[in-house]
Amino acid sequence: MSSAPPLVKIASEDWEFAEIHRLNHQTFAEEIGQHPTAPDSRLVDRFHSDNTYVVAVAQQRIVAMLALRSIRPFSLDSKLPDLDRYLPPNRHVCELRLLAVTPERRSTSLLAAVFAETWRHIIETGYDLAIISAYVRQLKLYQHLGFEPFGPLVGPSPDVLFQPMMLTLERFVPQAPQVFARWSETTAARGRYLPGPVAVHADVRAAFNGEPQSHRADAFLARFDLVASSLRSLVGARRVAILLGTGTLANDVVAWQLAPAGEPGLVLTNGEFGDRLVDHARRAGLSFDVIAHAWGQPLDLDDVASRLAALPRPGWLWFVHCETSTGVFNDLEAIGRLCAARRVRLCVDAISSIGTTTVDLSGAFLASGVSGKGIGAFPGLAFVFHDHDVAPASHALPRLFDLGLYASERGVPFTQSSNLVCALDAAIQRLDLPAPVETLAALAGWLRRRLTLLGFDLVGRDASPAPGVITIALPATISSLDAAAALEQAGCEIGARSRYLVERNWIQIALMGAGVSKAALSALSILLFVTCERLHRPSHAAVGDAGLA
């Protein structure tokens, strides 16, 4: 009976590190002669405390190893002082060192397994470029693994020379689909990456699971007042109504608040939700013009300014801050300044921006938000922020849309869900702005760059990217629904089934709610790449084929 294959893992035990020092000495002192031999046959690497070791273990011995390190200066920095000029810019770089395999194992596939585990660790840690000093006698081996040489030979003597080499993420992944064939079984990517409903933290679920309270109870009303105060503070608004419903309801309330005065307005749109504002305005019988841009393109503020100048006073302007369909930010601050300068009432759909970025609605006449997106609570509560006192309507306005009725009844004119309010309270308490939104923006930028490196076509490249959602246009050869279904089988939910996404063959990754991390998104990016490669080339793909387009 043949023995079991070596176990490939990240070294963690004391005896494993002792074995690493032994194999290090055997390879680099005794065999290569890069270091002098030691009486105890041990060689402790000078960067040992910083190294992460991928090792292959067989019968309580280390038979192969590779060290990973990301702290500068690298070993190569001392050998090649101008190292950075050889490397592509704006990368997360790690250095691979101390590749060693015992002589009896060098004719096996063990090296491939060690590199597979190394790259899984690299990917989950967020790096996208690995560099290595390749022993010149093994250059073909490194080239077979995808490494490319750069710079001059380096080494302690003419007899012991190394070739600096690099391997980028986008070069490695297409060449090694077998490395990720079983990725879905162990991936850290599992989770919900939808723009709603979002993944909810355990604290928020626990708050929701309490006994329902009467919406007339003093204890509930006191908590309701605190939640309303927290929402106002979150966005700098003077007043807020909390409605039992969705963002669609909130925007209907905004539209019907504008209707009675009959003032002319302007609706801006560059995506699905801007188009929906147009529909809200039409259904409410508003008098307005539309400035429409292609989906994913930035709004032309010069055009907005000229159209506002021609708008009779007083008028209003309505637009979407974060266009969820494309992952594009529209400039709230600049549009607010234009409206203020021309005494035009600013109305904002802030549904996908609240909780994902710092939002200032202090200058908004009316604005909408919801509980089940960036704030990280359950769906079911809608918000309408306003900067003015509103009396109950004396005209034919549906009671559900009567903002003044909410104001006159301490915010609760009708039945309200205490469970949703308690969950919202818990979710708001978990927000600690601005630190989380700054972290989210950096994480979103990193993920956009990684997806671009892997060949994905991101929607809205020429506009300001929103941190809460990233939209990807897939080529016609890959069905967006098939890609989403494959990821769901691996435990990852992404956006794909909305009508506007299906029509355009788009998918979305939303960074809203609980559980978003670099490790998870790094794994998700690779899982998405491998899934799309398989769908794009359902037959046997040639090793080395790259790209999705």
Image: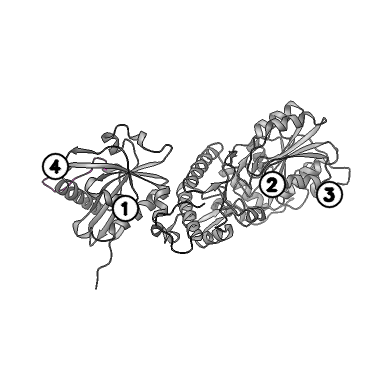
Q: Check residue 273 in the rendering and tell me which mark sits there, or answer none.
A: 2
Nearer the observer: mark 1 or 3; the answer is: 1
- Secondary structure of the residue carrying tag 1 is helix
Residue placed most toward the observer, 62 or 331:
331
Q: Pick the quarter of the image with the N terminus.
A: bottom left
Of residues 210 and 121, the one nearer the viewer is 121
Q: Residue furthest bottom?
A: 1
Image quadrant of residue 228?
top right
Question: Which label was assigned to residue 144?
Answer: 1
Mark 1 or 4: in front is 1
Question: Is disc 3 surrounded by few (<14), some (14 to 19) or many (20+) residues within 10 Å?
Answer: few
Q: Which residues are magenta?
A: 38-47
Task: Identify the residue under disc 4.
Answer: 36
Q: Where in the figure is residue 165, as x and y percent of width and height?
A: 31, 43
Amino acid carrying mark 2 in the image: Phe
| Nearer the camera: disc 2 or disc 1 | 1
Q: CA distance from mark 1 to mark 3?
A: 70 Å
Residue hosting label 3:
398
Contact (Cβ within 8 Å) of mark 3 with mark 4: no
Depth-wise, is mark 3 or mark 4 nearer the camera?
Answer: 4
